[in-house]
Image: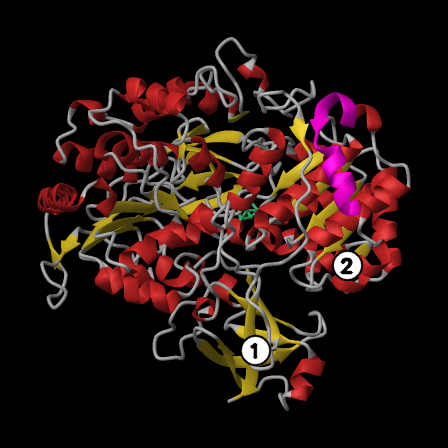
């Protein structure tokens, strides 16, 4: 190669899915810019995206070769791919023979490409005969998934990013897009700057950068979101701002909501939510007057023991006002990871099958059994979800776990129990790119995976937009694309014919075929089209004008994905089921992201430009709470909860509600320093329907060390 090569790809951090242009110099050096042709970001990139190429060029932490050990007392030793996969297949086969297919599980990631997600699902659900596969997206989006299914009939984000440019009111709730989805936030800021009548309402117990830019910040008391949304609904009804025709023609359930909120007094609700009543009424007035009303949310709603109820009560606001399925209107869950949506499309949760099919639906199972030509029936029993996987390991019911591209030893709630559970596993495989992943230390078999730019495939971003990611460079050492590792392992398990792929595109085309005639039909989309058009929004079936970019917005005909084609208004109860604060643990801890770090920092933690922003974790505490505990800004403190503690410095900040403290989620065990994992404190309480953990509400005490 003697000249610079240019590739269009997609940022592999958050669900905004920004397009990037990577230039590869003849000496192998990479430069990276935003892709002006990509409709999601129009050339813009945030600090993480701008520095992405440094994480690729610095390969000092890469896992280069398969390594294996025969006993926990022995060190990992280099082995060949053949030895590694033969041993893995032999162990899996033995455990399945002795204890049944549910004795093994896969735990995967929203970082995985669509092809990888599809193939590992095919392997375990169709050929091993267990539904024990779940993803770290369970920790992120599953409450929104259930909320959409129950309200709209399917896990379907109805809006597109272009709706930002026509909305008048943005209700940002339980989210900090200024830090976590920066490019979408810049589009919202630009919309407001050009149109001063546009209103931004931010509902968050913390005064984040998003809240600072809002016209109205509502620092809600944690756990009261359902009551708040119901109070907004009541105010909309009182103001005459609801759309009776839409409700009558396109929804069911309004009477149930009416009878529930009949008992809600907005004045009393405001007191419970810790907000001024006039602010709730102001928000309702703006929403009622808006031509375009977008609600945007992330983990403040989803990561909750009542996450589904929070989602349902928010989606209600769109259904009672008819603000859905038209430009600038709709509920818009902001996806955390780059391919969380693609994973769900391919069946990447323990309870679903490809193309949003359901493992509990006999017709869906039969369809996939015939499509895959499975040697065993697909199990009708939903598999273990993320937290259940580690509980089952702890209880000895699960024997082997294969972890792909995620770092549960930092990210799972109640991490001390998870660590103990990992010690009880008979066999742990970790397939990853980085030795920095804390989970590697628990592996019996470590497999080197190819990273971003080292493999090809597709991802779907938060507006249902599928993009193609080309292979730009060779992976180091013996690292292989994840999709290839999976098909090679499946072949070693004896499933040669069904996994006889030679390239990622074969896997993609098979997956696309199984979406035929579903609501997410992408039979009209292939690699050639994606390379030419850059991106397509699903659905985009054959004979659909995919050349125009697919389907921009869902439900424009107000025909929803329920059996009746009518959306369902729910009447969720208002009570929070989180663990209780008491005199011993009187503060509510909430965890979250900071601007320049990503997940457990295995990539961003290596880029000095990013670590400069916030170099070390601190616990933020309100000055009044600090004073009551004789804590000064910068003091070393212990944050103690019912399951563990962390020791780190305190930062006194009026940006928090009194009674609430905040810890960033990113840090693992820092070598030589104290264990500052936020998940020493969190608990594995989950929403009963979405199984998403309650990361945003932990009872703690903070005291001077
Ligand atoms: Fe990447 Fe998200 Fe930043 Fe876009 S907003 S550059 S997708 S991290």
Magenta stretch contains residue 155: no
The percent coordinates of residue 595 (x first, y second) are 58, 59
Taking 263 as reference, is 659 left or right? left
Up/down of 349 relative to 510, above or below: below
Viewport quadrant of the N terminus? top left
- Dot 1 corresponds to which residue? 585
Task: Say whether marks 1 and 2 touch (CB < 8 Å).
Answer: no
Chief secondary structure of the magenta portion: helix
Residue under the image location 56 percent in, 86 percent down? 703
Over which residues does the magenta segment extend?
247-261
Element on which disc 2 rests: strand
Residue 352 lies, in percent from the top left, at 41, 34
Seen in the picture, residue 239 relative to 346 is either above or below; the reply is below
- Mark 1 / mark 2, whichever is N-terminal: 2
- Residue bearing mark 2: 218
Which of the 4 quarters of the picture holds residue 618?
bottom right
Q: Is residue 435 visible?
A: no
Crowding at mark 2 (Cα within 10 Å: few <14, some 14-19, many 20+): many
Q: What residue is rendered at 53% in x and 39% in y?
A: 145
């Amino acid at each position: 190669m003697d000249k610079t090569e240019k590739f269009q790809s997609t940022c592999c951090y958050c669900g905004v899915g920004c397009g990037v242009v990577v230039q590869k110099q003849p000496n192998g050096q990479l430069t990276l810019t935003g892709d002006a042709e990509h409709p999601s970001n129009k050339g813009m990139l945030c600090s993480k995206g701008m520095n992405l190429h440094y994480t690729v060029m610095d390969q000092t932490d890469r896992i280069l070769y398969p390594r294996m050990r025969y006993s926990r007392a022995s060190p990992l030793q280099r082995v060949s791919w053949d030895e590694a996969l033969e041993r893995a297949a032999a162990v899996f086969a033995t455990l399945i023979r002795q204890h049944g297919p549910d004795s093994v599980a896969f735990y995967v990631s929203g970082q995985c490409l669509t092809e990888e997600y599809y193939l590992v699902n095919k392997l375990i659900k169709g050929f091993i005969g267990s539904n024990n596969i779940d993803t770290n997206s369970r920790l992120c989006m599953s409450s929104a998934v259930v909320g959409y299914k129950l309200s709209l009939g399917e896990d379907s984000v109805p809006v597109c990013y272009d709706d930002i440019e026509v909305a008048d009111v943005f209700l940002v709730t339980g989210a900090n897009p200024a830090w976590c989805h920066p490019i979408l936030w810049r589009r919202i800021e630009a919309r407001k700057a050009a149109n001063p009548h546009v209103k931004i309402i931010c509902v968050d117990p913390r005064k984040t950068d998003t809240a600072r830019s809002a016209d109205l910040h509502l620092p809600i008391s944690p756990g009261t979101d359902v009551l708040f949304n119901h109070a907004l609904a009541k105010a909309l009804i009182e103001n005459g701002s609801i759309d009776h025709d839409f409700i009558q023609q396109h929804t069911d359930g309004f009477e149930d909501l009416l009878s529930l909120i009949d008992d809600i007094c907005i004045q009393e609700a405001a007191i419970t939510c810790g907000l001024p009543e006039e602010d709730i009424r102001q928000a309702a007035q703006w929403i009622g007057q808006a031509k375009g009303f977008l609600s945007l949310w992330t983990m403040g709603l989803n990561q909750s023991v009542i996450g589904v109820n929070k989602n349902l009560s928010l989606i209600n606001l769109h259904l009672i006002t008819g603000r859905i399925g038209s430009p600038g209107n709709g509920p818009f869950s902001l996806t955390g990871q780059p391919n969380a949506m693609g994973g769900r499309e391919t069946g990447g949760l323990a309870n679903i099958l490809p193309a949003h099919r359901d493992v509990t639906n006999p017709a869906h199972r039969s369809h996939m059994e015939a499509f895959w030509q499975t040697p065993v029936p697909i199990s009708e029993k939903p598999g273990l979800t993320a937290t259940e996987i580690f509980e089952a390991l702890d209880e000895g019911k699960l024997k082997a776990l294969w972890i792909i591209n995620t770092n549960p030893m930092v990210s799972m709630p109640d991490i001390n129990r998870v660590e103990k559970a990992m010690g009880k596993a008979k066999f742990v495989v970790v397939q990853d790119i980085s030795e920095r992943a804390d989970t590697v230390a628990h592996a019996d078999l470590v497999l080197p995976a190819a990273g971003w730019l080292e493999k090809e495939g597709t991802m779907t971003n938060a507006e249902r937009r599928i993009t193609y990611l080309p292979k730009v460079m060779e992976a180091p050492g013996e690292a292989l694309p994840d999709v290839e590792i999976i098909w090679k392992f499946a072949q070693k398990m004896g499933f040669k014919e069904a996994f006889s792929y030679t390239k990622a595109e074969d896997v993609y085309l098979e997956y696309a075929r199984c979406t035929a005639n579903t609501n997410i039909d992408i039979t009209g989309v292939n690699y050639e089209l994606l390379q030419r058009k850059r991106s397509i929004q699903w659905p985009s079936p054959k004979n659909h004008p995919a050349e125009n970019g697919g389907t921009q917005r869902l439900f424009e005909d107000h025909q929803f994905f329920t059996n009746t084609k009518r959306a369902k208004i729910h009447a969720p109860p208002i009570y929070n089921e989180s663990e209780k604060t008491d005199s011993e643990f009187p503060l509510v801890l909430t965890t979250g992201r900071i601007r320049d770090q990503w997940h457990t920092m295995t990539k961003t933690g290596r880029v000095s430009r990013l670590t400069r922003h916030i170099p070390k974790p601190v616990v933020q505490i309100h000055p009044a709470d600090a004073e009551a505990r004789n804590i000064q800004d910068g003091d070393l403190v212990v944050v103690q909860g019912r399951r563990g503690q962390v020791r780190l410095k305190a930062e006194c900040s009026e940006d928090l509600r009194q009674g609430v403290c905040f810890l960033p989620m990113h840090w693992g065990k820092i070598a030589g320093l104290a264990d500052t994992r936020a998940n020493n404190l969190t608990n594995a309480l989950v929403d009963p329907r979405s199984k998403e953990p309650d990361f945003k509400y932990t009872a703690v005490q903070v005291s001077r060390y």
